[in-house]
Image (tube, rainbow, N blue to C red):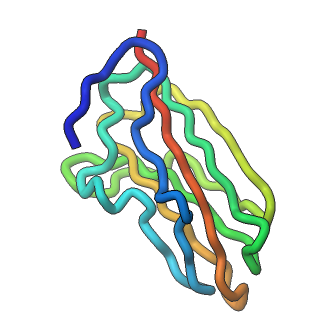
Amino acid sequence: MSYAISRGNNLIFITEPGGQTIEAGESVELTKTFPEGMDVSPYYTIRVAGGNRVVSEGAVTFKLIMKVNRVSFLLLDTFTVEPGEQFTRTYDVPGVGLTIKAEAEHGSGLDAVDAAVFGYKF
């Protein structure tokens, strides 16, 4: 994906309008369209926002993973969101690439999540 990076806030990633569904006990890479990870290097800070839809049947754990040369490198952050809950976190840019994974708890049924990442550039 090629796009111009302007000063201020830039949308780097957003899930499809219907969200991403996850079966119980499964893990999904939300940012799979970026095999090397989302390029966050041009930004000063990033904001990651998302949520677990109210129709979900269980908790979902989000994992923010730093990537270098297509290889998962270090876990930046992890947090669990119950159905109907949302989150937003701001980070200094954590390197070159970033991947977001979502994992549904075992026995939870079907879950639906959303996520968005914004980059801020001076």
Residue found at x 42% / y 34%: 94
Say which of 104 and 71 sits in front: 104
- Residue 86 at x, y percent in the picture: 74, 51
Q: Quadrant of residue 24?
A: bottom right
Q: Is residue 114 left or right of residue 81?
A: left
In the foreground, 87 or 8: 8
Residue with the most extreme front position: 17
Percent x, y for residue 104? 62, 76
> Is 44 located above or below residue 49 in the figure?
above
Q: Residue furthest top?
A: 122
Q: Residue at x 64, y 37 (%)?
A: 89
| Quadrant location of the N terminus in the rendered image | top left
Residue drawn at x 33%, y 44% is: 38
Q: Say which of 26 and 4 sits in front.
A: 4
The quadrant in which the C terminus is found is top left
Q: How many marks?
A: 0
Q: Is residue 67 left or right of residue 15?
A: left
- The percent position of residue 99, horizontal first and vertical second, equals 40, 52
Q: Residue at x 38, y 23 (%)?
A: 43
Vertical arrangement, residue 23 with respect to residue 72, above or below: below
